[in-house]
Amino acid sequence: MSQMPQQAAVSKCPSCEEPLESGDRFCGACGYDLSAVPPRPDDHPTVAVGGAVPAPAPAPDGVDWPAARDSDGNGRPVPVHAAAELPGTDSGGSPLPPPPAAPPAPSAPPAPGVRFDRPREPEEYPLQAPDPRLTASAAPHAEQRAEPAAPAAPAAVPPGAPSGAPAAGDKVCVACRAGRVDDDGYCENCGHAQPRERDHMEQESGPVAAVSDRGLRHHRNEDAFSVGCTALPDGAPASVAIVCDGVSSATRPDDASLAASRAAGELLLTALPRGTHPQQAMHDAILAASHAVNALADEPATAREQGPHQNAPACTLVGAVVTAGLLVVGWVGDSRVYWVPADRSTPPARLTEDDSWAAQMVAAGLMNEAEAYADERAHAITGWLGADAYELEPHTASFKPDRPGVVVVCTDGLWNYAESAEEMADAMPLDAAARPLHGARVLVGHALDGGGHDNVTVALVPFPAVPQGAGSA
């Protein structure tokens, strides 16, 4: 059971100093009430105002404790020792073992939060994939250094090849040159994302060639083209080139340009052999391209809910049909067609008029061409293909050149760096009619050297059209 605290017994009367017996509640000499004995004073002496320290009271219970020395006997104070300076002992009185030696101090003071007790790091880390600069034959050896305990390869893969090595017919990674590229466009060996197919495209169809490049500033290529050759009902050759430029402020501009170029190119290659006049075929091709782009706006209701304020897919279009004696051009937007004669002593010409703010200012006589195209609103287009276009107005024109030359079909990513017909002719190689693919590459390089701020696409069509089978030398 619980007990109340008991008070310690007193050996002498606090009042008269007469001895007491155990159990006395009052002093037998003076009658002092022993239950009111005050608590024992503090052990620390109280220093008087004069500075003298009173003599210590005698220890209770008759124990003779030695007094602490305040000098070493010669008048000098006893030296004070810190606890860490005194030798330690264990519970049995034996000396403690010496502490382990401290590590050497670093040469420079460590920065806060930096540890120097970590193991030394290797100079080189093992690669997870072969160095992209290695050849395909050396790549397996690099992989063996990184993965010395690689499991046995499947039967279809050569022994010693790295994990994810391509089999016959598989696409090979452009980085490690040793891994197979999966359906998502990533290497199964090193994980490197492969360049998108549309970042740089080249195509040659008979005497017609086209090149498209993403440029140096855009994250994707929103241009597209379609080139081909066919024959008219009388057997005469005909060449076709369509170039489309996606409107970046619209939704899915890359899909719009691809759909428009394919629809227009397919209609031309189908209509011309049936005897449709090239100019009428070009008009119908622009309408077909417009329908293809409009169809992209028919998205599911869930897609419209996620982006209700997005513009419909849109693009511009420009094209050319070249026969033995006729040149037909068609366009909607600000992509252009230039005529560059083979004889450079004769003047070149631009064959299209832009659907743009700048062109409207010039046509209205409000600005000259230099002032209009220097304005920041110059490239705002007033005509395009898309479900939200104001009104579709396909432009077509026919020409009968009296001398051979080259037809340049391009987006503004090129003509921004060769705006006038003379500048375009100067940028194009002299042998472009005989080597159209080489000429298209040179023109794309001219735009990239100038800054490559936009996607760049150009198609070259020699005039007059040559029979199928002729191409770049």
Image: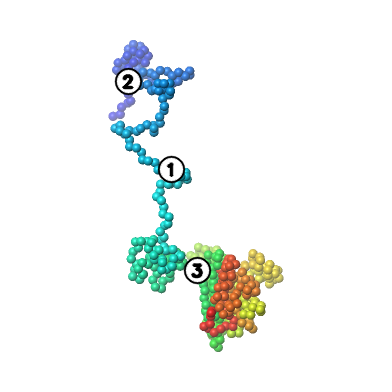
| Relative image position of residue 445 (x, y in whole percent) | 57, 70
| Relative image position of residue 243 (x, y in whole percent) | 56, 74
Going by the numbered disc 2, the residue's amino acid type is Val
Figure label count? 3
Compare marks 1 and 3 and give the one earlier in the sequence.
1
Going by the numbered disc 3, the residue's amino acid type is Glu
Would you say residue 58 is visible in this rendering? yes
Residue furthest toward the right?
A: 365
Compare marks 2 and 1 and give the one earlier in the sequence.
2
Instruction: State the separation of the CA atoms marked 2 and 3.
Output: 103 Å
For label 3, the SS is loop
Q: Residues within 10 Å of mark 2 (few under 14, many from 20)?
A: few
| Relative image position of residue 429 (x, y in whole percent) | 59, 75
The reply to whether dot 2 and dot 1 touch (C-beta < 8 Å) is: no
Say whether residue 243 is left or right of residue 179: right
Say whether residue 180 is left or right of residue 361: left
| Residue at mark 3 | 299
